[in-house]
């Protein structure tokens, strides 16, 4: 009886030990970005883009966590093609790209995380972006070389111009 109890206790201890190791390795793989590259263009133009690098890791992590928790955009959302600015965001962790995103400042303010993952920016998101712009340092060439995600679904906004006028 004593031997069985000890074997059971030993087995439970081993299981708990290995489950703790698995939890640690999974936690270690969770992305924790430490810097952010921002490519900013005004309106639909690609003339005179601004490249900035934000290295204040606390702000970068706050912005990243906020961005990935933004509400999902409704699939049937109608957005006029009124864009004030376009922001291509690249989050890095130890020189490895963690996440690319594209944020549009305009009427609907979509944030595209991947081809099929479009979110809606909130006031808090734009507040964090303003802080990032304030402390970002200009860079001459982008640190990332791959394209940012673009939505695959064609928004109805491409069919409707500002105030219902045809965009053509």
Image (spheres, rainbow, N blue to C red):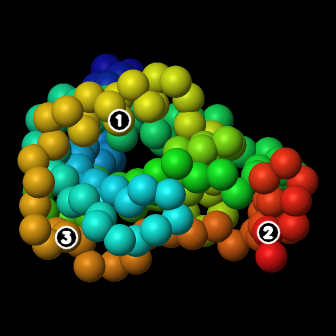
In the displayed structure, 84 sits above or below 15; it is below
Does the CB distance between marks 1 and 2 fall below 8 Å?
Answer: no
Q: Position of residue 115 (x, y in %)?
A: 60, 68
Q: Mark 3: few, some, or many residues within 10 Å (few <14, many ≥20)?
A: some
Q: Earlier in the sequence, mark 2 or mark 3?
A: 3
Of the numbered discs in the image, which one, if any, rests on residue 167?
Answer: 2
Q: Residues within 10 Å of mark 1 (few under 14, many from 20)?
A: some
> What is the C-alpha distance between the residues marked 2 and 3?
32 Å
76 vs 18, nearest the viewer: 76
Q: Please name the residue that numbered disc 3 is placed on.
A: 142
- Residue 64's disc is none
Q: CA distance from mark 1 to mark 2?
A: 29 Å
x then y, percent, for residue 63: 35, 35
Relative to 39, residue 66 above or below: above
Which mark lies nearer to you, 1 or 2?
Answer: 2
Using the image, determine if residue 81 lies above or below residue 7. below
In the image, what residue occupies the spot 67% across and 42% down?
A: 107
Residue at (42%, 56%) from the top-left corner? 42
Q: Which residue is mark 1?
A: 129
Identify the residue at horizontal 35%, vertical 35% (top origin).
129
Residue nearest the observer in this picture, 3 or 13: 13
Q: What residue sits 33% from the left and 79% below the top?
A: 146
Q: Position of residue 138 (x, y in %)?
A: 11, 54
Report how many numbered discs are placed on residues in the image.
3
> What element does badge 1 sit on?
helix
């Amino acid at each position: 009886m004593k031997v069985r109890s000890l074997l059971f206790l030993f087995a439970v201890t081993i299981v708990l030990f290995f489950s703790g190791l698995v939890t640690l390795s999974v936690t270690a793989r969770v992305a924790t970005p430490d810097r952010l590259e921002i490519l900013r263009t005004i309106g639909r133009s690609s003339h005179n883009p601004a490249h900035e690098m934000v290295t204040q890791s606390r702000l970068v992590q706050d912005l990243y966590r906020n961005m990935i928790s933004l509400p999902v955009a409704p699939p049937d959302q109608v957005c006029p093609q009124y864009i004030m600015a376009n922001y291509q965001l690249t989050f890095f962790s130890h020189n490895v790209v963690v996440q690319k995103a594209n944020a549009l400042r305009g009427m609907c303010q979509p944030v595209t995380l991947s081809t099929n993952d479009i979110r809606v920016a909130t006031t808090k998101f734009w507040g964090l972006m303003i802080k990032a712009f304030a402390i970002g340092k200009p860079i001459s060439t982008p640190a990332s070389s791959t394209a940012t995600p673009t939505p695959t679904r064609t928004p109805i906004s491409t069919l409707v111009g500002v105030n219902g006028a045809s965009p053509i």
